[in-house]
Image: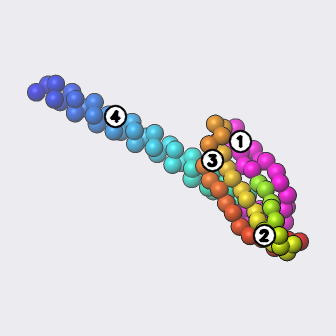
Amino acid sequence: MAIVIILVCFWLSGMIYINLLRADARAERLRAFVETKRIAVETKQQQSFFDEEIAIDTTLFVKKSIENYQNDAGLNILYIETFNNSNRKLASYKQIIMAE
């Protein structure tokens, strides 16, 4: 009986540990999503339509690029991708914008 109780305790502690690891990953992705949207809004407000890389802090960095949309001189595509320090993509953003 004691072995069964110990096994159940180990199983429960393992499940709690796995849930904590998943919650941390979700928080990182949420933060990356918020930063991506913030940079997209700032880019459109300030009309800073050029390629750049932005370091948010030591854990996140953002790549922003502008490309032509289907050979149309009046339209561009704004791409924003956010990565963690191990170069894993956490969030992305894509929008067609009017060329100035």
Residue 74 spot, x, y in % from top left: 85, 74
Q: What residue is pinned by disc 3? A: 89
Q: What residue is pinned by disc 2? A: 70
Callout 4 amino acid: Gly
Q: Is residue 48 left or right of residue 11?
A: right
Q: Residue furthest top?
A: 3
Callout 3 amino acid: Lys
Question: In 3D space, how far apart are the residues under numbered discs 4 and 3 (Cα atoms)?
Answer: 28 Å
Q: Is residue 21 left or right of residue 34?
A: left
Q: What residue is pinned by disc 1? A: 57
Badge 1 local density, few (<14 within 10 Å), some, or many (20+)?
few
Question: In 3D space, how far apart are the residues under numbered discs 2 and 1 (Cα atoms)?
Answer: 35 Å
Asked which secondary structure carries label 2, the reply is loop
Q: Which mark is residue 14?
A: 4
Q: Which badge, 4 or 2, comes first in the chain's sequence?
A: 4
Callout 2 amino acid: Gln
Callout 1 amino acid: Asp
Q: Which span is picked out in magenta?
A: 40-63
Q: Which badge, 4 or 3, comes first in the chain's sequence?
A: 4
- From the image, state whether disc 1 or disc 3 is nearer to you: 3
Q: Which badge, 2 or 1, comes first in the chain's sequence?
A: 1
Q: Which badge, 3 or 2, comes first in the chain's sequence?
A: 2
Q: Is residue 76 above or below residue 55?
A: below
